[in-house]
Amino acid sequence: MNSIELQQNWEDDGLHEECGVFGMYDLDGNDVASSIYYGLFALQHRGQESCGISVSDTFGPRKVDLLKGMGLVNEVFNSENLSKLHGNIGVGHVRYSTAGESIPSNAQPLVINYVKGTLMLAHNGNLINANELRDELAYTGAIFQTTIDSEVIAYLVARERINAKTAQEAVTNAMKKLKGAYALVISSPRKLIGARDPFGFKPLCIGKRDNAYILASETCALDTIGAEFVRDVLPGEVVTIDKDGIKSDTSMCLPKAKEARCVFEYIYFARPDSNFDGVSVYHSRIMAGRFLAMDSPVEADVVVGVPESGNAAAMGYAMESGIPYGTAFVKNSYVGRTFIKPQQKSRESSVRIKLNVLKEAVCGKRVIMIDDSIVRGTTSDRIVQMLKDAGATEVHVRISSPPFLYECYFGTDIPSRDQLIAHNRTIEEINEIIGADSLGYLRVERLKEIAGGLGICTGCFDEKYPMEPPKEDIRGEYIK
Ligand code: SF4
């Protein structure tokens, strides 16, 4: 591309979740596609590259209707194509890729036919042993149609199913071979199955509406379709939903002390109106702001958040410090997937197209600006400068996560350490680069408190990964 560069996500310095999953089984036989569509709509923040829905009828012949494509949920689906998806059991998915290319064939759900019927599968997370498993399967005859690790899971489940008595037993047996992060929603012909990896990196919850059960990455998706929250799927648990209700297999669960939820779900990924394993995401962010005020206090006139996830933390900082909370940024929410990134020399900047400063709110004031993270640092300096250009006399930056120092292998696209601004730099050096008057980060010791004392992963902050990381950076290497 010459004069303009199309990019899939304009936020150069943001982090991305890999995926969102949603499954539904209506025991009364009603179509579920439109509810899955609205569920995916609520999970859109977890992935904007591609999406898909597959459905089948538990009362009728084993036929699967599948529609998936590149783009946002409302770009891929419309009332006409949605009305052609018939079935009372189904699986949906929104995707952002951290492993595997961004191409239509990598969109999910995956649908595979095998001797025991049809399997529909949606996966959120990242396996660290996908290459080995893929090779093993390929040498015994498997032919892969995608470059994603989720297909490895689908094959393993299908293969295990041949010798297992039930589909859920096949899932449990497949899990014994998987290493890494996964929240799975799988539909066998007459069962909806949900599973979380034993560490519980990724969230998955169960809901119910009338005589229909739902599995979803986040509780906000249950609210959107008017379903009640039943409970979270436990880390390591396999739940099976069929006409007899919910069955649970906890044989893969680890002791609580070993659980390792991705703490970045609380800080940034999840929607603030979701609860993850009994902890409110909004409350976590308020707590992070409160801790920042306790640990990195500074005198100022107003506390502002960088939308969206900085807002709740800014509120927490304001509550704890007594400094008034204000709104300094107006966000353009219509910056889509195919946003045309301005050229380097152009006078428009990506940041300014997305965010504008309310001058009246900051002019002549000492401002505390709360953001959720600094990754490469390529946008923080511009946001600080925008506040100064608007007349802020001082800008103190507070970050509601600790400095990113290491890679993530479990489904978050944290770049390699040499691209992280905090790697090999002191906080003073980072402060100088972003041009703020002071800079403070959340302390690593505070993370467990913001997650309500639950077991969490902190690998990208302190290199204490819950499992041995791969020797080399294997992210994105499934293309062979
Ligand atoms: S390394 Fe960081 S981003 Fe990755 S799972 Fe752990 S806490 Fe989440």
Image (cartoon, rainbow, N blue to C red):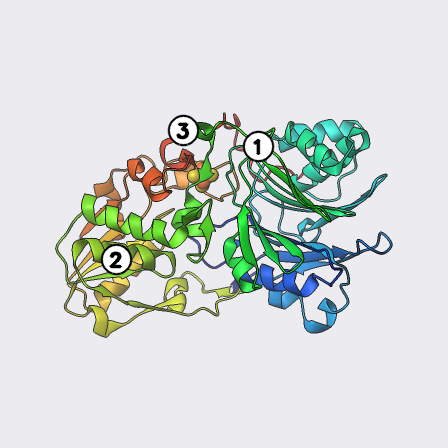
Instruction: Tell me what residue is drawn at x 62 percent, y 51 percent.
Output: 102
Q: Which residue is mark 3?
A: 464
Marks 1 and 3, the one that precedes in the sequence: 1
Mark 2 crowdedness (10 Å alpha carbons): few <14, some 14-19, many ≥20: many
Q: Horizontally, is 419 left or right of 144 in the view?
A: left
What kind of residue is marked 2?
Answer: Met
What kind of residue is marked 1?
Answer: Ile
| Residue 475 point in image, percent of width and height | 55, 38
- The secondary element bearing badge 3 is classed as loop
Instruction: Tell me what residue is drawn at x 51 percent, y 54 percent.
Output: 219
- The relative height of residue 35 versus residue 433 in the rendered view (above or below) is below
The answer for how far apart the CA atoms under marks 1 and 3 are is 16 Å
**Outermost residue to the front:** 244
Q: Quadrant of residue 132?
A: top right
- The secondary element bearing badge 2 is classed as strand
Q: Which residue is mark 1?
A: 128
**Outermost residue to the left:** 299
Q: Horizontally, is 218 left or right of 31 in the view?
A: left
- The relative height of residue 350 versus residue 451 in the rendered view (above or below) is below
Mark 1 crowdedness (10 Å alpha carbons): few <14, some 14-19, many ≥20: many
What kind of residue is marked 3?
Answer: Lys
Q: Nearer the viewer, residue 334 or 351?
A: 334
Q: Nearer the viewer, residue 398 or 39?
A: 39
Q: Horizontally, is 317 left or right of 341 in the view?
A: left
| Residue 77 point in image, percent of width and height | 67, 67
Q: Nearer the viewer, residue 110 or 189?
A: 189
